[in-house]
Image (cartoon, grey):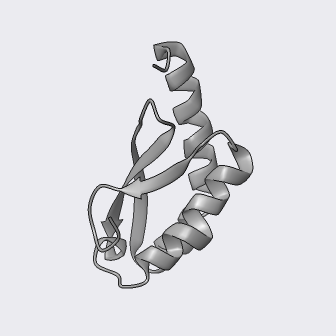
Amino acid sequence: MIDSNDKVDLMERINHALDEIRPHLNGDGGDIELVDVTDDMIVLVKWIGNCAFCSMSAMTMRAGVEQSIKAKLPEMKGVKAVNGYYK
């Protein structure tokens, strides 16, 4: 189980990684929101705006979101959307 203080720090670091790709998502009328981090080190995100319905969300998840997070936080095992096209 992730300690609550560690989780706050972890979520801040994940948000910083997401900040790097947000401008690209915003340019297409979308965004992404960090929902939680599981004890299994899976990042849960929510697609917002156009991203929630975009058929390219799966590719964006793998090539953008997941790579950005894992580059800064290699301990993360994966990223999962809790809504939208890519689940």
Q: Position of residue 74 (x, y in %)?
A: 70, 44
Is residue 1 positioned above or below 56 on the image? above
Say which residue appears at 47% left-offset and 43% top-offset. Answer: 42
Q: Quadrant of residue 73?
A: top right
Q: Position of residue 57 (x, y in %)?
A: 42, 76
If the image is split into quadrants, where does the N terminus sit?
Answer: top left
Q: Position of residue 20 (x, y in %)?
A: 65, 59
Say which residue appears at 52% left-offset and 34% top-offset. Answer: 11
Residue 20 visible in rendering: no
Image label count: 0
Is residue 55 positioned above or below 39 on the image? below
Residue 81 visible in rendering: yes
Is residue 46 positioned above or below 13 on the image? below
In the current view of this chain or complex, which residue is farthest to the bottom? 55
Seen from the viewer's position, the closer of residues 34 and 29 is 34
Q: Position of residue 48 (x, y in %)?
A: 33, 64
Say which residue appears at 56% left-offset and 62% top-offset. Answer: 65
Q: Is residue 59 left or right of residue 83?
A: right
Say which residue appears at 56% left-offset and 19% top-offset. Answer: 6
If the image is split into quadrants, where does the C terminus sit?
Answer: bottom left
